Image: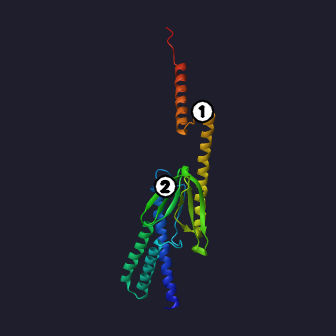
């Protein structure tokens, strides 16, 4: 194979990968907005497994399908056998479907840390109130060979390792998720500290929802009292 043919084949592979990633990101954006991992709560911060994450077996099928699509597309134009465009389209569609099906991601909301693993599409969740620590573990490597992940420590000492992503483009997003989780953990600790202080002073801790209901009830009573005072009286 000549150098020109090799460059053309690589160009086909780059085009197949670029188009696949464009479609995948659009579909994922819709899915994240319509069906967040956190359920009824919005996903505040997220990170995904990149297609170039090193050491992920599921991604081998993605790249095999993309290479097959690129090879079939290149052969169709190089040998002028345009029927080969059909298997090229089918292979590209298979790569797209597999990428969406095996999507791994992590999401953090104000109350939950959620993650989705691989082709089984299993979704797990942990309340932030149960977390004792969160760290970002990074395995350095050259370029896309480096990987990172979040590691959660629960209040019972159990360690939970979340899905990995490439450090090349994913480390910053993983750190953003970790920092957001730490902020929510600090808020949970502050609420527990205030509740403990209230109990120590002999005052029962008031739930925020109950406090809001009491305030509304007080405002309603004051409104009724004001209406009664301003009502016209019969002087006859």
Residue 113's place in the image compared with 91, above or below, is above
Examine the rendering and report whether any part of residue 110 can be seen.
Answer: no
The residue nearer to you, when weighing 157 against 223, is: 157
Query: What residue appears at the point 44 percent right and 78 percent down from the top-left corner?
Result: 64
Which label belongs to residue 203?
1
The residue nearer to you, when weighing 55 against 24, is: 55
Instruction: Select label 2 or label 1 by which is in front.
Output: 1
The residue nearer to you, when weighing 185 against 78, is: 185
Q: Residue furthest top?
A: 236
Residue 189 appears left or right of 83? right
Q: Residues within 10 Å of mark 1 (few under 14, many from 20)?
A: few
Examine the rendering and report whether any part of residue 31 can be seen.
Answer: yes
Q: Earlier in the sequence, mark 2 or mark 1?
A: 2
Query: What residue appears at the point 45 percent right and 66 percent down from the top-left corner?
Result: 118
Residue 85 picture location, percent across and down = 39, 80
Query: What residue appears at the point 36 percent right and 82 percent down from the top-left corner?
Result: 83
Residue picked out by circle 2: 125
Query: What residue appears at the point 49 percent right and 69 percent down from the top-left corner?
Result: 22
Q: Residues within 10 Å of mark 2 (few under 14, many from 20)?
A: some
Residue 81's place in the image compared with 180, above or below, is below
Q: Quadrant of residue 95?
A: bottom left
Callout 1 secondary element: loop
Q: Residue furthest bottom?
A: 2
Residue 101 appears left or right of 160? left
Q: Which colour scheme appears in the figure? A: rainbow
Residue 166's place in the image compared with 125, above or below, is below
Q: Quadrant of residue 215?
A: top right
Residue 59 picture location, percent across and down = 47, 72
Residue 15 picture location, percent across and down = 49, 77
Residue 211 picture location, percent across and down = 55, 35
């Amino acid at each position: 194979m000549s150098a020109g043919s090799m460059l053309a084949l690589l160009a086909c592979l780059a085009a197949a990968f670029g188009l696949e990633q464009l479609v995948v990101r659009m579909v994922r954006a819709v899915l994240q907005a319509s069906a967040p991992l956190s359920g009824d709560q919005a996903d505040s911060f997220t990170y995904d497994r990149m297609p170039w994450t090193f050491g992920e077996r599921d991604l081998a099928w993605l790249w095999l399908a993309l290479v097959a699509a690129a090879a079939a597309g290149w052969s169709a134009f190089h040998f002028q056998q345009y029927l080969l465009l059909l298997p090229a389209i089918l292979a590209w569609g298979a790569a797209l479907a597999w990428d969406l099906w095996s999507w791994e991601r992590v999401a953090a909301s104000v109350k939950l840390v959620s993650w989705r693993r691989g082709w089984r599409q299993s979704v797990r969740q942990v309340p932030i109130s149960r977390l004792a620590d969160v760290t970002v573990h990074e395995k350095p490597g050259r370029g896309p060979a480096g990987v990172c992940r979040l590691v959660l420590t629960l209040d019972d000492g159990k360690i939970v390792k979340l899905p990995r992503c490439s450090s090349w483009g994913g480390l910053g997003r993983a750190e953003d998720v970790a920092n957001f989780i730490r902020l929510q953990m600090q808020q949970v600790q502050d609420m527990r500290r205030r509740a403990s202080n209230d109990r120590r002073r002999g005052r029962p801790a008031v739930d925020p929802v109950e406090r809001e209901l009491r305030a509304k009830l007080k405002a309603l009573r004051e409104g009724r009292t004001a209406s009664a005072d301003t009502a016209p009286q019969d002087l006859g």
